[in-house]
Amino acid sequence: MRPLPPEAFNLIKSFEGLRLKAYQDSVGIWTIGYGATRWPDGSKVKQGDKITLKKAEELLLHDVARHANPMLALTKVPLTDNQYGALVSWTFNLGVGAFQRSTLRQRLNRGEYHLVDEEILKWDKAGGRRLRGLTRRRQAEADLFNTRTEIPQPVKKPRRRFFTWLTNLTKDNKHS
């Protein structure tokens, strides 16, 4: 995984929130740390699980990589560290499938960087209703995306296993 800029890591942490004891989220899924529902071995978080701050951050990095690598594989244009960080946060929150199907990705891959922040901001609804917390998160992601402090990094050739994963994800979504 390309290193995640500290600004993006902190943005994700601030919006996900931290819980060191497992809790049920709003739809009843056991969750821990910064929004993790599974451990790195794939087992589900369950009632009674506990975690340290250090382990919560390690788990977050693991979960971020699960979203960052496929997002990067779907990106065909160079990204600055801040653009990369903003898109990782967006993808972490909404999922790789949302990124794959989004107009955001289409515009980005056409090199329409100036339109990406508009696309980021569109994703602030849940259940058809605009949520203030999501609006704030999307604004923070758009602001980070537009903070240009370095030369864009070339897109690395994605590893074959990510294409296999994305193909399986697409097949799974078609059957849902």
Image (cartoon, helix red, strand yellow):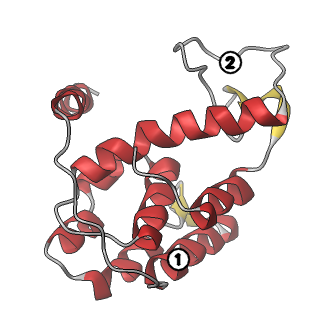
Q: Is residue 123 left or right of residue 151?
A: right
Which residue is painted at 62% across and 39% down in the image? Answer: 60
Q: Residues within 10 Å of mark 1 (few under 14, many from 20)?
A: many
Q: Where does residue 18 sit, x and y in percent of width and height? A: 80, 44
Q: Is residue 26 visible?
A: no
Report the residue that reaches farthest toward the bottom: 114
Numbered circle sitting on residue 67? none
As shown in the figure, which amino acid type bears the numbered disc 1? Leu
In-front residue for pair 102/83: 83
As shown in the figure, which amino acid type bears the numbered disc 2? Val
Q: How many marks?
A: 2
Which residue is painted at 19% across and 68% down in the image? Answer: 77
Q: Is residue 75 left or right of residue 147?
A: left
Q: Secondary structure at mark 1?
A: helix
Q: Where does residue 70 sit, x and y in percent of width and height? A: 30, 43
Q: Residues within 10 Å of mark 2 (few under 14, many from 20)?
A: some
Q: Secondary structure at mark 2?
A: loop
Q: Is residue 73 visible?
A: yes
Q: Is residue 155 left or right of residue 65?
A: left
Pair 1/2: label in front: 1
- Residues under labels 1 and 2: Cα distance? 31 Å
Numbered circle sitting on residue 45? 2
Which image quadrant for residue 148?
bottom left
User: What residue is pinned by disc 1?
Assistant: 144
Which comes before the other along the chain, label 1 or label 2?
A: 2
Which residue is painted at 69% across and 66% down in the image? Answer: 133
Residue 56, relative to residue 38: is it above or below?
below
Which residue is painted at 18% across and 78% down in the image? Answer: 111
Q: Where does residue 91 sit, x and y in percent of width and height? A: 43, 53
